[in-house]
Every structure is written in C-alpha cells, then in structure tokens.
Image (spheres, grey):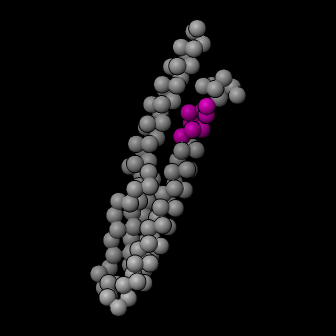
Amino acid sequence: MANFFQQAKQAMELRNKMKKIQKDLENKVVEYENGGVKVKVSCDMTVKEIKFDTELVALDKLDKFERLILDNTNKALKLAKDEAAKYSQTAMREMGGLGDLLGGM
C-alpha cells in the first residue's frame, strides 16, 4: 500500500514538472527572418508576431509576398518544434526519466 502512495506522489510531482515545462515552452520564443519578413513563434507552436518591410507589399507581387510569409511561418514553426523537443528532452533527463514512476520498466 505504501508503494501505491509513493507512486501517486511521484505521479503528482511529474504532473507538476510537466506543467512547468509546458509553461516554459509557452514563454520560449524563436524567430525566423528572410526576405524582409520576420516571424516569431513560441515553442508551444503559437505564432506570436509577423512583421514585414512595407516596401515588399507591391500589389502586382502579392502572391510572392504571401508565399514568403507562409514559408517563413513554417520555418519558424519548425525552429520552435526543434527547440521544444530539445528543451523537453533535457528537462526529462533532469527529472531522471520515467523509470522510477514506471517501476523501472
């Protein structure tokens, strides 16, 4: 019975640590800039900001501008995804993995 309570305690600790990781990822922001378009994305995959050089907006080249925004947004999201994975792996290692919680499986 004591083992059950120990595992429940470890599960609560893990839950709290995972909440902290999620909050950290919300606050961690990466940016990608190319062709006068800058995109900022948080590591929880939320687009935070898109800025562009107003001289780029020529009505006759709007399709090129739209592609640039789309490409830069996707590249910023990939950077955020990679950063989130790296951060999560480091955090899990620091927590000692899940071995204790899962009974050493």
Depth check, front residue: 62 or 80: 62
Picture residue at 53% right of the left edge, 23% below the top: 10
Relative side of 22 to 97, left or right: left
| Percent x, y of residue 46 | 40, 56
Total marks placed: 0
Does residue 56 sit above or below 11 in this rendering? below
Does residue 56 sit above or below 91 in this rendering? below
| Quadrant housing residue 31 | bottom left
Does residue 78 sit above or below 37 in this rendering? above
| Percent x, y of residue 9 | 51, 19
Depth check, front residue: 15 or 88: 15
Q: Is residue 32 visible?
A: no
| Percent x, y of residue 25 | 44, 48
Magenta residues span 91-98
Picture residue at 43% right of the left edge, 37% below the top: 20
Q: Residue furthest bottom?
A: 60
| Percent x, y of residue 80 | 48, 57
Q: Is residue 4 visible?
A: yes
Residue 46 lies in magenta, yes or no? no
Picture residue at 40% right of the left edge, 48% below the top: 26
| Quadrant housing residue 98 | top right
